[in-house]
Image (spheres, helix red, strand yellow):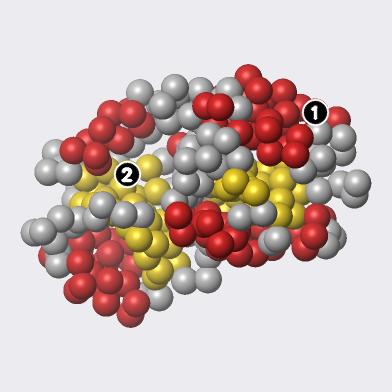
């Protein structure tokens, strides 16, 4: 088998959001894949600063972060896209007008509203990141900063239509993450564009690309290659793309799929 580039989403794929761990079976599978000569990459909607520490401790060959806004191979930054401070602040201002809250994600830090949000999920995320030392130095509504992408929360009070129309004018793209949440990045960026940067850098064929994921923001990379591995618990939008649907991460789904595909 030719060396392949394997791209892994984090949450719900490599990392159990139920148990807050990477299963030992997944680490064993990753180690075996490296021994077999495969390239291993994280491909996540998270920005680099917010990756869980167990992920950072494993010797991946590189990282695609922020839905394709950042790509790194062997400590070399191949691509990085950050919104200007002016554009970043204009989006924050529009969110305030539309009664929308969010998390503003950068390479070195994530940024939260200065005031307590009415969205419980946002506050839960704030507490989670605070324990990682993230999102405690600068705040939206107080400080001027730039970021790569954002994740927003809406409800019946929010002018979602007006905000999405504004994003189109700003050449920003919103992925519907369900339950009134949206993941937003500049148009032309996705997990698939990150895969393409790495593929070209390593001079690989498309048939040498394998992707593993579970959520709607994984759809572009699932459509990018025929080797799309969908986790047992997943967004149904991924079903048409799946080469195989494996078990859940808690049921050792990563190891199971990699054995089924002959990667280990």
- The quarter of the image holding the C terminus is top right
Q: Position of residue 27 (x, y in %)?
A: 67, 25
The residue pinned by badge 2 equals 111
Name above or below for residue 230 compared with residue 23.
Answer: below
Give the mark nearer the N terminus: 2 vs 1.
1
User: How far separated are the C-alphas under marks 2 and 1?
Assistant: 37 Å
Q: Determine the secondary structure under disc 2.
A: strand
Q: Position of residue 180 (x, y in %)?
A: 24, 55
Q: What is the quadrant of residue 194 in the picture?
A: bottom right
Q: Position of residue 211 (x, y in %)?
A: 65, 50
- Residue positioned most to the left: 157
Name above or below for residue 15 compared with residue 100.
Answer: above
The reply to whether callout 2 and callout 1 are in contact (CB within 8 Å) is no
- Residue positioned most to the bottom: 169
Q: Is residue 106 visible?
A: yes
Q: Residue at x 55, y 42 (%)?
A: 231
Q: Residue at x 44, y 22 (%)?
A: 19
Q: Is residue 144 visible?
A: no
Q: Determine the secondary structure under disc 1.
A: helix
Which tag is nearer the camera, tag 2 or tag 1?
1
Q: Residue at x 59, y 60 (%)?
A: 241
Residue 84 is left or right of residue 139, and the answer is right
The residue pinned by badge 1 equals 32
Residue 161 is left or right of residue 71, and the answer is left
Residue 111 is left or right of residue 6, and the answer is left
């Amino acid at each position: 088998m030719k060396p392949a580039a394997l791209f892994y989403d984090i949450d719900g794929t490599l990392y159990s959001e139920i148990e807050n761990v990477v299963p030992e079976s997944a680490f064993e599978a990753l180690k075996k894949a490296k021994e077999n000569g495969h390239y291993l990459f994280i491909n996540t909607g998270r920005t680099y600063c917010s990756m869980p520490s167990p992920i950072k401790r494993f010797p991946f060959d590189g990282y695609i972060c922020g839905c394709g806004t950042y790509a790194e191979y062997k400590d070399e930054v191949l691509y990085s896209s950050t919104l200007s401070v002016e554009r970043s602040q204009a989006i924050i201002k529009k969110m305030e007008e539309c009664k929308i809250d969010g998390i503003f994600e950068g390479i070195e830090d994530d940024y939260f509203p200065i005031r307590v949000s009415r969205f419980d999920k946002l506050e839960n995320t704030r507490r989670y990141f605070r324990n990682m030392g993230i999102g405690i130095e600068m705040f939206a509504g107080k400080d001027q900063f730039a970021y790569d992408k954002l994740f927003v929360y809406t409800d019946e009070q929010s002018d979602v239509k007006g905000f999405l129309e504004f994003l189109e004018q700003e050449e920003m793209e919103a992925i519907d993450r369900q339950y009134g949440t949206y993941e937003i990045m500049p148009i032309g960026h996705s997990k698939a564009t990150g895969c393409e940067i790495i593929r070209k850098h390593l001079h690989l064929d498309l048939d040498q690309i394998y992707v593993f994921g579970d959520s709607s923001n994984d759809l572009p990379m699932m459509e990018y290659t025929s080797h799309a591995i969908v986790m047992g618990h997943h967004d149904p939008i991924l079903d048409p793309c799946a080469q195989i649907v494996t078990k859940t991460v808690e049921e050792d789904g990563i190891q199971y799929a990699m054995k089924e595909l002959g990667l280990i």
